[in-house]
Image (cartoon, rainbow, N blue to C red):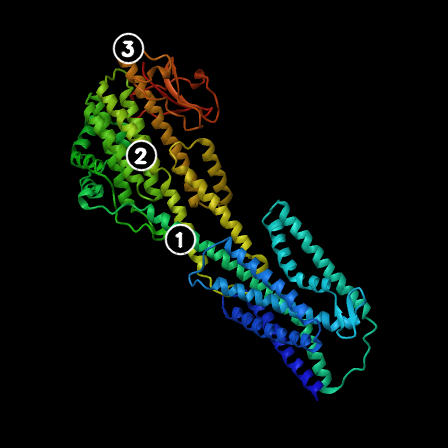
Amino acid sequence: MNVVRETKLDALFSSFVLIGFVLVVAGNLLASGASTTPQWLILAGLIAGVFGAAILSARVFWRHRIGLNAWLLMFGIHAVGMAMATQIFNWLHPGGRAEGASVGINALLLAFALIVVMLVRGAVLLDAASRMPGWLAARSEKLGATPRLWLFALYWMSPLAWWAGILSAVDIFILNDSASAPMAALILCVAIAVGRFAVRLVLFEKNKYTNWQRSPEGRVKARAYMTSAGFALAGALSFYAYFFMAARVQDDAFAAQVKHNAEARAAEIAAMQPPALAPKENAETIYKLSRASLAPINWHWARASWNTQEARTEIARNLTALSYLRQAAAVRGIDYGIDWSADTRKLEVPVALMTSMGELSGLALLELRQAADKEDWQTSTKNFSACLRYARHLGALPMVDGSGMALDVEIRSTEVLAAALFKPGAQPPDTALVDFQKALAEHLDARGEYCGRAVYFTFVSHYGGMDRARLANEFPGKASVSRMLKELALIDWHRQIDEESFMASLKLMTRQHMDQDEVRDITRRVSARRPMGSLTWNDLCVGTATANLNALESLRLLEAAIAIKRYQRHYGAWPSALKDCIPLFLTEIPPDPNKKGRFVQYDSSPPRVYTIGTGMNCDPQQHGQPDENYFNAYSLSIKHCENGNHVLFLAN
């Protein structure tokens, strides 16, 4: 009677395993859709199957009643070791999900899944011990046949080896990790798996012809088949439960890291916000008056006809707007009242506003050129200083549009002032030249605060949104074989590290002395991430990095040229070398932005300042001569030579 009762109970718990296996298979087959039903099917299957496998295997241990203390000791060592490994994994990536408790809960479930794997493995070994050869099992009158300790250890280590082998294989073959540690771990895991299958093959061959028994009949036969199927599937189901929970623990640890990064990026975005300013301290209040006073100009015509009476008439129509511009430029900051923590893709300054902002600086530069032609250097000084401060106001906006316009204002201001100062016959007083130098020095000291920050802000906001989307995934997540094998947290971690490295490269753009090598590094990084055939923020990043370098190069060339002009006005001759201007007219030779350790170059015949570009050609004779009417144009564009050098000519 007891035997019949025992077989009934074994069949009952085997049915739990069978039901769980069916639910897991069904859930995986349906897991490709968007519905969450397959996730709950798999979760229900795991609960039913693991419960049945645990009880079924525990009953085998109870019936044998052999070496229980020794088995519990070995089991405890493995369980504690796995718990410690899980905890260390989480310690390496501190933090937690929004609900805070899922990391610890999933770690406990992982330990429980490992316990079930050990129980099933141990039960299978105990059941087969009587049919094992002497080198696999020990026999005694009191305990009967028991598997040897090393065999228990081999079977209990195999789940860990399987999971570690999967991680190592992903790291080597998908993430292209060339380190020796993953390869060594993979070889060790394969060796354990091979040993495990070798033992299984020995047992199969040993018992292939020795298990002939009289087949049971009727219900007893059905119960025997049910129990055999339960044990056969319990191993697979418990393996799946272990792999699933191991993936969940990794996901939890990764989510903790993502949450930490999202919080850090949110704090960084908050720190980049323009300060809230009172109306009396806010330049935007005055800029609004300036924009409201604008009289539209055809800028193509205005630049071509800058020195005509018609162009002077247009300036006269905009004197009110120009007066407001100079007032606003002297105010501390600007605040457009935009919520910069919102979705970056929705942060767009209206086109009409950007157009009027460009016209403001254009008007000031047109008046600067006209005033210099009439030797009104006081007005020219005010407008040049106002344009540079205006560029800093634009650069304070954490947006691509504002940053790009700030750099454009810098370049145009440099070119227009150079045309005014170096026009043949121009006689700017030394006081005006000193004022131009002060405005440049003030601007160069401040520009490192905004150059490129708009593009960096765009990326940090974009990745912050991605982090928030990642954190929206709740337990049990994508509970499928595909999730565990193709979308492991290890892959996400690799992508996260790459993104952090990319963000660190973008920060280089905020440095005032960024050189050409750093721009190339940024270009290489963003090119590797840019989708083919599409214009992305990556393209804007590269464009802004290059524009920043060009703008800084123009400012440095003008800085050196003004010092040379002061020397020539003071001594009546051009200096023989740029160092002759130190310290009376120049504190130090301006650095060449193209390369750290290099400086702006100067040649006196004809007088010109230049940088050393990609061609690395220092020969002044390779720079050519200024084009016809070079000094009479509205703006004095810096000449780009074939070898990559940039040259600013000075009139004799």
Image location of residue 582, percent across then percent down: 33, 17
Q: Is residue 292 above or below residue 478?
A: above
Residue closer to the observer: 297 or 531: 531
Q: Which residue is mark 2?
A: 446
Sequence order check: which comes first, mark 2 or mark 1?
Answer: 1
Is 590 rendered above or below residue 346?
above
Disc 2 residue type?
Ala
Quadrant of the drawing holding the N terminus: bottom right
The residue carrying mark 3 is 572
Of the two numbered discs 3 and 2 in the rendering, the one whose residue sits closer to the viewer: 2
Identify the element where label 3 is drawn: loop
Q: Nearer the viewer, residue 223 or 414?
A: 223
Q: Quadrant of residue 572?
A: top left
Q: Is residue 633 visible?
A: no
Q: What residue sits 77% from the left and 67% below the top?
A: 137
Q: Residues within 10 Å of mark 2 (few under 14, many from 20)?
A: some
Front label number (1 vs 3): 1
Nearer-N-terminus badge (3/2): 2
Residue 286 in view here: yes
> Neighbour class for label 1 at 10 Å: few (<14), some, many (≥20)?
some
17 shown above or below 294 = below
Q: Residue at x 34, y 44 (%)?
A: 399
In this rendering, is residue 41 above or below 308? Answer: below
- Of the two numbered discs 1 and 3 on the same chain, state the one appearing first in sequence: 1
Q: Which residue is mark 1?
A: 263
The foreground one among 534 and 124 is 124
